[in-house]
Image (cartoon, rainbow, N blue to C red):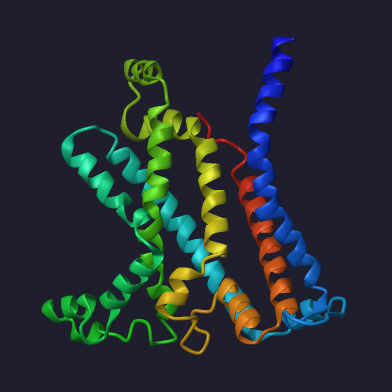
Amino acid sequence: MNTLRSRRFIIMGLLPAMLIYALFVFVPVIWSAYYGFFNWSGIGASSFIGLDNYVEIVHDPIFWRALKNNFIFVGAAVLGQVPLALILAILLSKNNFLQRFLRSAIFLPMVLSTVVIGMIWQYIYHPQIGILNFFLDTLGLESWKLQWLSDGKIAIFALIPPLIWSFVGLYLIIFMSALQNIPGEIHDAAQLDGATGLRKLASISLPMIWGTVQVALVLCISGSLKSFDLVYIMTKGGPAHATELLATYMYNSTFTSYRYGFGSAISTTIVLISLILIGSSQWITSRKPKQ
């Protein structure tokens, strides 16, 4: 009886949040998927065209360029943000003044507006007054100076450092919380058994926070696939679509060309790609490391 009451209490407590989440997340996704089958300019009547929008997406070279760039973003985020945050969480696990200061400094970009972050990195990459080219000048590496955001060959890779810098603090806090929740008795027992350093990390710490790592991967993949604001502020998808992402491709198709049906089809495609990548990551990481 007490268990039943407890379950009812939990359900009643979660119900308002679940309703709000469904209203502002699930309903728009379903509505967007519905309009993906229509030719609609955002106003006036819409006409049903079936899968024509999706066929056009598949045959559009800009879509494939955006998809490729998004895969680069996802790879950079998964291989950059998550491992770096885990290493920093291990190194900054102590509670002295220096490590508290470093943790705060690393987390600072999370409290900044993306517009501010984009403007900061625009100044860093500026070809005339940017600190990066000035630093290369100081080191006598003038040949390394580049048009970081104007060169189509390197612009997408120039966006990776601000991407990692702006979100690594989030995963640092997540991993630090997970590591601190490991019971101290387990660490003491491992020390008595002679497990220290990398051996303790591989055999104890990492297996015990593996669920947190999986959650971080989901957040990382989904966040990278919907990246928009940072890229839009810094390059707007240019030059010549060199930094176009799926989200900017959707935005330009919807609000610049006024093709709301086509934009809805793109957003549905993004959701499907996200589900495939997230499902693949969970399948790959479903087996815990051997202890």
State left or right for residue 19 relative to residue 72. Answer: right
Residue at 55% x, 43% y is: 214
Q: Is residue 99 above or below residue 33?
A: above
Determine whether, in the image, residue 147 is placed left or right of residue 250: left
Percent position (x, y) of residue 217? Answer: 53, 49
Which residue is at a point 38% across and 29% down the rendered structure image?
180
Residue 202 vs residue 269, the one in the foreground:
269
Give the residue furthest to the bottom: 240
**Residue 229 percent across, percent down from the top left:** 47, 69
Residue at image coords 17%, 41%: 98
Counting from the top left corner in percent of width and height, residue 75 is at 50, 62
Q: Quadrant of the N terminus?
A: top right
In the image, residue 190 sits, relative to residue 134, either above or below, namely above
Q: Is residue 207 left or right of residue 157?
A: right
For residue 217, side relative to residue 192 (left or right): right
Q: Residue furthest top?
A: 1
Please state which of residues 25 and 170 is positioned toward the viewer in this rendering: 25
Instruction: Give percent across and percent down for residue 34.
Output: 81, 67
Between 45 and 103, the one lying in front of the other is 45
Question: Number of marks in the image?
Answer: 0
The answer to which quarter of the image holds residue 249 is bottom right
Viewer-closest of 161 and 287 = 161
The answer to which image quadrant residue 172 occupies is top left
Query: With respect to residue 66, does 269 lie above or below?
Result: above
Residue plotted at (19% across, 34% down): 96
